Image: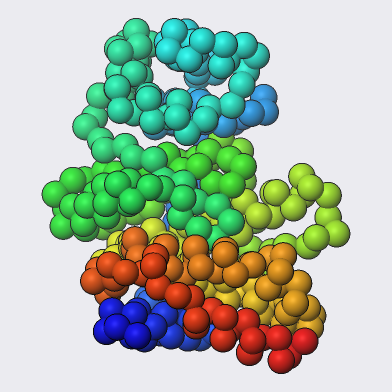
């Protein structure tokens, strides 16, 4: 075995060890103590599926509760989007990520007449942030932009950073603002849920619930985790490290759940088959972990360690 394969085997050993180790709790406690979350009541959403438009409205019209103004904004924006994406919005359809990218990258809202007349002209930085099922879902390029924005916010080079967050089944915005030498986190959600209800730490997934209730619980759990990630970014942690930690912890937590039910065979075959493990461990690590920048032969390396892991797990079945 050449030295590159030996180095990669050692790295893989370290990553597999992380799967079965406890996550970093200390920094999470520090972040919670420094940055708390406040809720701003916004124009409330009653029509389903258009939460993305409420998030955009709250971003650019500063929590304006004028329902007539919202619909004026909505139909002007729909007209613009239908010119670019013909047929996408025939009946109050959902805002997709590619719609949001197009809107932000081309400053579409700033071109609307309703924004010219009523929008908030205070300079602000707006970026999308996607999170669901325990994983940050932005691309590597977007992660770099997010990291840069948080660094500049921490250093007070910008005073306001607005995140339009797509979380599991819902869009909302999180506004980060320097106000009188203090950085405040504001949650602005068109559903106007109570913070205690949203961040109830007793919420757990229950597979016996209906699909809609499971989705609502998943959303609340993911929102809670996203807030924690943002708090950690604000104390200077690297988003790439956080990304990898959550990806690895997701695999580890899944393993623990199946192990408690003595269903490790199902975990290996169905939940995380070896090709999936290879993707989670090798590809994620190759792309994101700063310590693995020298891994040039990883995709050609014979996956001996994962085979050994499978054999070890099989002994428990």
Q: Residue at x 29, y 22 (%)?
A: 106
- Residue 104 at x, y percent in the picture: 34, 28
Q: Is residue 44 left or right of residue 304?
A: right
201 shown above or below 54: below
Q: Residue at x 45, y 26 (%)?
A: 99
- Residue 200 at x, y percent in the picture: 63, 63
Q: Is residue 114 left or right of residue 70?
A: left
Q: Residue at x 77, y 87 (%)?
A: 317
Give 288 or 44, whichever is nearer the viewer: 288
**Is residue 290 something one can see in this rendering?**
no
- Residue 197 at x, y percent in the picture: 65, 56
- Residue 316 at x, y percent in the picture: 73, 90
Give 281 or 45, whichever is nearer the viewer: 281
**Is residue 108 something one can see in this rendering?**
yes
Quarter of the N terminus within the rendering: bottom left
Q: Residue furthest front?
A: 1
Q: Quadrant of residue 36?
A: bottom left
Q: Residue at x 64, y 28 (%)?
A: 49
Give 195 or 13, whichever is nearer the viewer: 13
């Amino acid at each position: 075995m050449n030295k590159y394969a030996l180095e990669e085997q050692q790295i893989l050993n370290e990553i597999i060890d992380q799967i079965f180790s406890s996550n970093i709790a200390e920094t999470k406690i520090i972040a919670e103590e420094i940055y708390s979350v406040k809720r701003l009541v916004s124009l409330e959403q009653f029509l389903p599926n258009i939460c993305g438009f409420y998030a955009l409205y709250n971003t650019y019209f500063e929590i304006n509760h004028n329902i007539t103004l919202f619909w004026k904004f909505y139909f002007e924006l729909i007209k613009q989007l239908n010119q670019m994406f013909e047929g996408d919005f025939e009946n109050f359809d959902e805002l997709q990520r590619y719609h949001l990218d197009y809107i932000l990258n081309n400053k579409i809202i700033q071109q609307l007449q309703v924004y010219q007349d009523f929008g908030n002209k205070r300079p602000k930085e707006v970026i999308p942030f996607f999170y669901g099922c325990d994983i940050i879902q932005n691309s590597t390029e977007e992660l770099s932009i997010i990291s840069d924005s948080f660094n500049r916010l921490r250093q007070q080079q910008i005073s306001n950073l607005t995140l339009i967050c797509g979380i599991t089944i819902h869009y909302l915005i999180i506004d980060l603002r320097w106000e009188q030498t203090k950085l405040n986190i504001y949650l602005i959600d068109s559903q106007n849920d109570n913070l205690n209800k949203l961040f109830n730490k007793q919420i757990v997934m229950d597979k016996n619930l209906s699909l809609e209730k499971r989705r609502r619980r998943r959303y609340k759990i993911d929102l809670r985790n996203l807030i924690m990630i943002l708090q950690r970014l604000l104390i200077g942690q690297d988003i790439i490290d956080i990304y990898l930690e959550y990806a690895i912890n997701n695999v580890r937590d899944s393993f623990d759940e199946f192990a408690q039910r003595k269903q490790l065979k199902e975990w290996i075959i169905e939940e995380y088959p070896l090709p999936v493990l290879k993707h989670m461990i090798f590809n994620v690590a190759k792309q994101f972990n700063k310590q693995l920048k020298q891994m040039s032969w990883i995709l050609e390396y014979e996956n001996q360690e994962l085979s050994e892991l499978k054999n070890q797990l099989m002994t428990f079945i």
